[in-house]
Amino acid sequence: MTIRILINTSEMEMTPHLKEYVEKKLLKLNRLLDNLDEARVELKFNSSVRSASDKHVAQLTVRGKNLLLRAEERSEDIYTSIDVALDKLHRQLEKFKGKQMHLREEHAALEADADISQPKEESSGAPIVRRKSFLVEPMNEKDAMEQMQMLGHEEFFLFQNMQSGRINVIYKRRDGSYGLLEPEIR
């Protein structure tokens, strides 16, 4: 299965060479994990920042079955930003792949050993400056914690709870433990 690649630019021109460069690099990720469905690439030139080393931004998001990974990098060169963000994604994919292998081995060991039968604060009136939409995958609470960590989300992660079928939010508490919000609709 080939990965669908979507590239958006902001305040910069998408040259054929840049597009080819991004696509070639992203196709290598598909070799690492073959169930990747989509890769979104946002390239931006930010002229308003003071530091030259933060002007070129590359934000990469990959989606697959029970997988959502994101990496962002800023540098003085767009190609460097892309390469470093891809390196971050590569490490995240390796980590995810390792966890999947460990879970498969653990599950196989359990089957061999036992007989298993199958049955925020209030708004200050500030405008919303960014909106995001994303696919919510069903997963258990442990997988949601792992996704939260792999995405680098320090505070919270929204997911569909596989057991209840409802939308939940897992969040990190000040003491380092995790909490789970289970909203009820009246």
Image (tube, grey):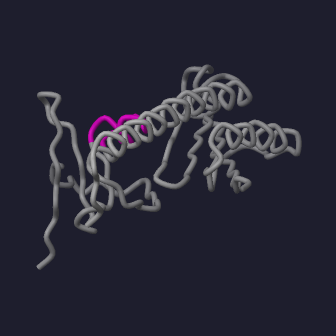
Q: Where is residue 131 in the image (x, y as percent from the top left)?
A: 43, 58
Identify the residue shown where x is 62% and y is 21%: 52
Identify the residue shown where x is 37% and y is 37%: 109
Q: In which quarter of the image is the N terminus?
A: bottom right
Q: Nearer the viewer, residue 109 or 54?
A: 109
Left or right side of 92 for 4: right
Identify the residue shown where x is 49% and y is 30%: 95
Question: Residue pushed farthest right?
Answer: 16
Q: Does the magenta stretch include residue 100?
A: no
Q: Does the magenta stretch include residue 151?
A: yes
Q: Which quadrant would residue 17 be assigned to in this image? A: top right
Left or right side of 181 for 89: right
Left or right side of 179 for 137: right
What are the residue bounds of the magenta stretch?
145-155
Q: Say if 93 sits above or below 68 in the image.
A: above
Q: Quadrant of the C terminus?
A: bottom left
Identify the residue shown where x is 41% and y is 42%: 108
Q: Where is residue 165 in the image (x, y as percent from the top left)?
A: 28, 68
Q: Position of residue 74 (x, y in %)?
A: 58, 28
Question: Residue pushed farthest bottom?
Answer: 186
Q: Where is residue 96 in the image (x, y as percent from the top left)?
A: 48, 36
Q: Which quadrant would residue 150 be assigned to in this image? A: top left
Q: Say if 54 sits above or below 27 in the image.
A: above
Q: Nearer the viewer, residue 34 or 89?
A: 34
- How many discs appear? 0
Q: Is the magenta stretch mostly helix, strand or loop?
A: helix
